[in-house]
Image (cartoon, rainbow, N blue to C red):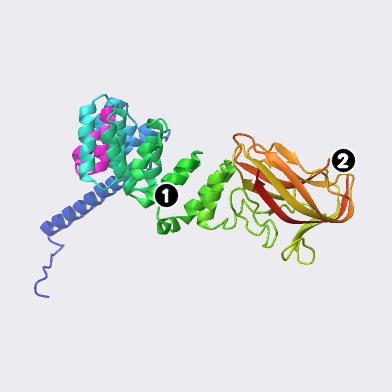
Amino acid sequence: MNDLIAIDHRRPRARVLLALAAIAVLLFGWFSIRNQLGNLLATLTQESDPNLVDVSKIANGLAPSDPAAFALAAAASDTSGAVVALENAVRHAPSDFRWRTELGRAYEQNGDTGKAEEQLLTAVRLAPNYSYARWHLGNFYVRQEQPEKAFAELKLAAENSPIYREQVFSLLWDYSGKDPEPLERIAAERPEMKARLAYFFAARGRAPEALRNWNQLSESEKGSNTAIARSIALGLFDQKHFAEALEFARQYGSENEAVAGAVTNGGFEKAIGDNEESRFGWTVIRNDPKFEAAPDPRVRKSGNRGLRLNFKGSSKPAFANILQTVVVESGGKYRLSAFVRTESLRSAGMPMIEILSANDDKSLALSKPFLSGTNDWQEVVIEFTVPQGTNGVTIRTVREFCGEECPITGLLWYDDFVLTKA
């Protein structure tokens, strides 16, 4: 305890020292709090704030050497004023790539492209692995019509950041006039970028490009990106790119039984309507309590079961309760055959099978109405030609129109749907 110094506060000189120390602490605390308040205002205030000018003045007054306060002042100034403010920000934080980047952008807006490039290059040197700096340098080169330099910077920005990846793809897509080649060059070496590029093309309706890039991935790489494949498959189906949608769905495991040009599960040997993601199997629309569809192991034409449709007095004048989309060749000629059995089937508007274009929902062919009453298995045959530009057809059950109130009762069985190309 001998090394402690005791100050007698009763002596005048000691009182002065204590007072000066207290004042120093207060001043230090005040300036520290001021700087913190100024930085807080500068970092939290949005450029769209209606009080931006006033807030920026307060922030600069509280924190006169804070780079963030100068950046806020730049946002509140015209082009020349922004340059001055950002020059001050860089002077106070010369190693911060953010202010170098912003100063470079301000120089460019002010027409000084030489200084702009210098600052943007310095930002990249300070933070070579940050996509933010490379993204802005790449954009600068795009605007300066220096595509090779732009490509090099944007490629690194996309590789380093999933956030900037989509922006890079979009920028090059527009800049190249929707030419896929520059984007494919950017994604060539990275599987995760190749998968995202496939998604990018699919989202823009470029189904062949999406599938081509996806198929350049190895099986293990595809397995690591099944969520992307699923999104692409569902999206391409909605866009009516049926062939590519089927291929993506098969590859991620949703449509293992579906094949182009053939009816899936045509004999109803497997469950139907259970896979919510399926777009190329049988769909059962159960929105009518007076209609029921279920597999029937007791009544079948072949195999182990058929499909039973039970009509319990439904009065809907039109319905399409059992349907399936099949991939077909544009312009191709096809023949659909199926077997139908009825029991006590009664209505003024009998069921029948319709083929319609899945691309525009136009009817291509209709079977004859099914026989009323009770009838053993009868073969139904429909021949049709696929219109040019159509790559998918829908097979569905419909009715003859018989007025707004037209009940139907009885049972109907399906089995052995087969589609062949003529």
In the image, is 190 to the left or to the right of 415?
left
| Residue 393 or residue 180, whichever sits in front | 393
What's the residue type where badge 1 is placed? Ala
> Mark 1 and mark 2 in contact (Cβ < 8 Å)?
no
Residue 347 placed where, x, y %? 89, 48
In the image, is 130 to the left or to the right of 330?
left
What's the residue type where badge 2 is placed? Cys
Say which quadrant the C terminus sits in.
top right
Residue 297 placed where, x, y %? 76, 66
| Residue 264 or residue 349, whichever sits in front | 264
SS of the residue at dot 2?
loop
Q: Which residue does the numbered mark 1 point to in the structure image?
A: 195
User: In percent of the image, x 65 and y 38: which residue is there?
Assistant: 386
Furthest-left residue in view? Answer: 2
In the image, is 5 to the left or to the right of 79?
left
Main SS class of the magenta portion in the image = helix
| Residue 333 or residue 80, whichever sits in front | 333
Q: Relative to 142, is 288 above or below?
A: below
Furthest-front residue in view? Answer: 422
Give the mark nearest the N terminus, 2 or 1.
1
Magenta extent: 86-108
SS of the residue at dot 1?
helix
Q: Relative to 284, is 152 above or below?
A: above
Magenta stretch contains residue 92: yes
In three-dimensional space, the C-alpha distance between marks 2 and 1, rounded to whole angstroms, equals 51 Å
Residue 33 placed where, x, y %? 29, 49
For label 1, the crowd category at 10 Å Cα-Cα, with few meaning under 14, some 14 to 19 and many 20 or more, is many
Asked if residue 208 can be seen in this view, the reply is: yes
Determine which of the numbered discs, if any, sits on residue 287 in the image.
none
Determine which of the numbered discs, if any, sits on residue 402 in the image.
2
